[in-house]
Image (cartoon, grey):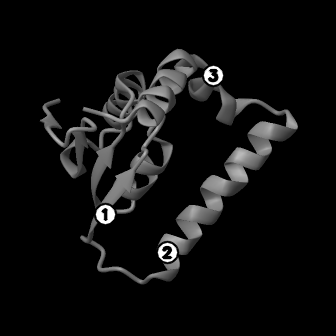
């Protein structure tokens, strides 16, 4: 059973999923900051010089943008989130970009979900 603080976090992301779906495409300041954080994280991963077929665990995959970018770069990605709504967005993004063969999506209790 998840702790009360984890339940709070999960509830927050379940209730704000639509916001997270749209925020990266808006032109306001906060979305620009989020996109910069996204690009910074991907830059750190590139700097690791991992094997092209390396397997990466993404904890808190959210809307799936980093998952898609990593899978599109050839990595195998295990995407994990506690919020079902966020996992659905990740699944939708992965399928939309045709990288589902490189991604496994997991619930918070670490059960892989099929595509």
Query: In this picture, is 52 found above or below 29?
Result: below
Residue 6, horizontal then vertical, whole percent = 43, 35
Q: Residues within 10 Å of mark 3 (few under 14, many from 20)?
A: few
Query: In this picture, is 16 found above or below 108?
Result: above
Label 1 secondary element? strand
The front one of 37 and 69 is 37
Q: Are marks 2 and 3 in contact (CB under 8 Å)?
A: no
User: Marks 2 and 3, how far apart in space?
Assistant: 28 Å
Quadrant holding the C terminus: top left
Q: Earlier in the sequence, mark 2 or mark 3?
A: 3
The front one of 79 and 8 is 8
> Does residue 11 appear to the left or right of 84 in the view shown?
right
Q: Residue at x 51, y 26 (%)?
A: 13
Q: Residues within 10 Å of mark 1 (few under 14, many from 20)?
A: some
For disc 2, the marked residue is 46
Farthest residue in the right direction?
Answer: 29
Q: Residue at x 35, y 80 (%)?
A: 50
For disc 3, the marked residue is 19
Q: Nearer the viewer, mark 2 or mark 3?
A: 3
Q: Nearer the viewer, mark 2 or mark 1?
A: 1
Q: Earlier in the sequence, mark 2 or mark 1?
A: 2
Task: State the count of labels.
Answer: 3
Label 2 secondary element? helix
> Does residue 3 appear to the left or right of 35 in the view shown?
left
User: Marks 2 and 1, how far apart in space?
Assistant: 12 Å
The quadrant where residue 83 appears? top left
The quadrant where residue 28 appears? top right
Q: Residue at x 49, y 43 (%)?
A: 65
Query: In this picture, is 74 found above or below 21?
Result: below
For disc 1, the marked residue is 56
Q: Residue at x 48, y 71 (%)?
A: 45
Residue 56, horizontal then vertical, whole percent = 31, 63
């Amino acid at each position: 059973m998840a702790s009360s603080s984890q339940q709070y976090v999960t509830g927050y992301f379940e209730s704000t999923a639509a916001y997270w779906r749209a925020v990266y495409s808006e032109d306001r300041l906060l979305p620009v900051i989020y996109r910069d954080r996204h690009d910074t994280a991907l830059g750190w991963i590139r700097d690791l010089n991992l094997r092209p077929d390396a397997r990466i665990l993404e904890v808190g995959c959210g809307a799936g943008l980093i998952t898609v970018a990593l899978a599109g770069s050839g990595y195998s990605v295990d995407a994990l989130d506690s919020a079902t709504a966020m996992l659905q967005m990740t699944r939708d993004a992965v399928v939309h970009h045709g990288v589902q063969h490189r991604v496994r999506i997991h619930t918070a209790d670490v059960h892989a979900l099929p595509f």
